[in-house]
Image (tube, rainbow, N blue to C red):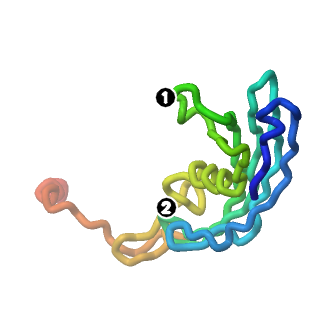
Amino acid sequence: MLIDLEPLLQGGKTKLELDAAFDFSNEELDGGYPFSSPVSVKGSIVNRAGIVTMEAAASCTMQYICDRCAAPAEKTLCVPMTHTLVAELNREDDADAYIVIPDGKLDLAQLTWEDLLLFLPSKLLCRDDCKGICPQCGKNLNEGTCECKKEIDPRFAALLDLLDS
């Protein structure tokens, strides 16, 4: 979805309301398709004294497989989207601080997708205290303990013999 920001960048208009939904159901992420429902973006783009800023939030529900226990999980996200938009850069070292829109058209879907990816944690867990699975028998430790005996590090086996004496 391209948004024409030329009136805002030129100062002819002061505010543009955002209310859009994007279908990312075909976008693959870590071997799955976590966004089966549309991602909603609401907010505004405002020109205040020549500075064009975007204040919005992307809301969605994602389905994924927990990275620790491999159980299916679902999480509701609200991703803040705050950016300063410019037509051109005065200095190259400002590239990380601004979103450059040279032709006056903002691809809101692409920006939303990028912000979603940057917001996601490196590990997607079903819950914060996920215990994972037993490395020996594969039981989900969130559902209870397993019957496996803990492996003893052979370097410490001699110390255990001292405790038995």
Select label 1 or label 2 by which is in front: 1
As drawn, is 41 to the left or to the right of 81?
right
Name the residue furthest top. Answer: 49
Q: Which residue is mark 2?
A: 131
- Quadrant of the rendering where the N terminus is positioned: bottom right
Query: Vertical placement of 42 versus 51: above or below?
Result: below
Q: Quadrant of residue 164?
A: bottom left
Q: Quadrant of residue 89?
A: top right
Reading the chain from its start, which is encountered first: label 1 or label 2? Answer: 1
Name the residue furthest left. Answer: 158
As drawn, is 93 to the left or to the right of 19?
left
| Amino acid type for the residue under numbered disc 1 | Asp
Crowd tier of the residue under label 1, counting other residues whose Cα lies within 10 Å: few below 14, some 14–19, many 20 or above:
few
Q: Quadrant of residue 75?
A: bottom right
In the rendering, at what x and y percent does residue 73 appear?
63, 68
**Mark 1 in CB contact with mark 2 (< 8 angstroms):** no
In the rendering, at what x and y percent does residue 68 appear?
48, 64
Query: Vertical placement of 87 versus 36: above or below?
Result: above
In the rendering, at what x and y percent does residue 138 appear?
41, 76
Q: Residue at x 63, y 39 (%)?
A: 99
Crowd tier of the residue under label 2, counting other residues whose Cα lies within 10 Å: few below 14, some 14–19, many 20 or above:
some
Q: Which residue is mark 1?
A: 93
Q: Residue at x 72, y 52 (%)?
A: 108
Q: CA distance from mark 1 to mark 2?
A: 44 Å
The residue nearer to you, when weighing 134 against 72, is 72
Q: Residue at x 87, y 32 (%)?
A: 12
The secondary element bearing badge 2 is classed as loop
Query: Vertical placement of 119 versus 127: above or below?
Result: above
Query: Vertical placement of 50 versus 115: above or below?
Result: above
The residue nearer to you, when weighing 53 against 69, is 53
| Amino acid type for the residue under numbered disc 2 | Lys
As drawn, is 48 to the left or to the right of 73?
right
